Image (tube, helix red, strand yellow):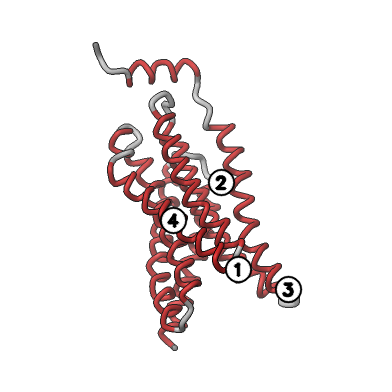
Amino acid sequence: MESYRFIVYLHIAFGIVALATFWTAAFLRKGSPRHRAVGKIYLLAMIGVLGSGVPLVLTMIGLGKPIPALFLTFLLLITGNACWFAWRAVRYKAQRERYFDATFWLMASIVLVAGLGIVGLGVQVNSMLLQVFGMLGVVGFIDAVMSQRRSASHPRWWLKEHYGAMIGNGVATHIAFFSIGLRNAFPGLDPGLVQNLAWFTPLLGAVAAGIWLSRRYGRPNPATSRIASLQARPAG
């Protein structure tokens, strides 16, 4: 039990670093050396969060809690996938085909299948939480298909991929924070209400952030889009 408590504290510590660096990077000038440096710290902290989450899954299985274990496994999967996509989008911003490679589609497909499984589990146990978050795997795959199609005529396709993945990471980071913070700050509130606020508030915030960022950065310049389309067109 002491080792489990240590893992929980370690998980929380990595989460605090991730939350702090997430917002620090958000307010720094995009693409600046400080933004990139803080972003690297954030991704390292998220690796710590993901790594410490595995023993928590195993503990849930040992305690006879298969449904929470499956749900946490799914959350670790989609969060890890988002971290990986965020890093790859920047690394391969000049190599679009390298980004949308076979491994990309393999991971997107795994998340899709896992999401459908969580939706089915949610229907079986009558859990709206599982159904809604399971759909993130489905929506993520659809977005991957649309992003690949749009990228040929969008010179800043990688930026949308990057901030889209980081929004997903932000959802996971804030859910973890609110799940603990709200419960401790408002111990008298109904546990069901606290759970819904902790899980759905970050999700709604992510939708709003995605719309705002798409309007600011996601619309390609007509001239540069035409040049990108001509460059992507095969010769002859």
Q: Residue at x 48, y 78 (%)?
A: 65
Q: Position of residue 193 (x, y in %)?
A: 71, 67
- Whichever of callouts 1 and 2 sits on the residue coming sooner in the sequence is 2
Camera sees residue 41: no
Q: Quadrant of the N terminus?
A: bottom left
- Whichever of callouts 1 and 4 sits on the residue coming sooner in the sequence is 4
- Local packing at callout 2 (Cα closer than 10 Å; few below 14, some 14-19, many 20+) is few
Question: Which of the two discs, 1 and 2, sits closer to the camera?
Answer: 1
How far separated are the C-alphas under marks 2 and 4?
25 Å
> Is 27 on the left or on the right of 48, as rendered?
right
Q: Is residue 2 above or below residue 108?
A: below
Q: Give yes or no for contact between labels 2 and 3 (Cβ–Cβ under 8 Å).
A: no
- Whichever of callouts 2 and 3 sits on the residue coming sooner in the sequence is 2
Q: Tell me the tag on residue 190.
A: 3
**Residue type indicated by callout 1:** Ser
> Is 133 on the left or on the right of 55, as rendered?
right
Q: Secondary structure at mark 3?
A: loop
Q: Tell me the tag on residue 78.
A: 4
Choose between 32 and 220: the one closer to the eye. 220
**Residue type indicated by callout 2:** Phe
Q: Secondary structure at mark 1?
A: helix
Q: Is residue 90 above or below residue 12?
A: above
Q: Which residue is mark 2?
A: 27
Q: Residue at x 40, y 57 (%)?
A: 80
Choose between 76 and 162: the one closer to the eye. 76
Q: Position of residue 124 (x, y in %)?
A: 54, 66
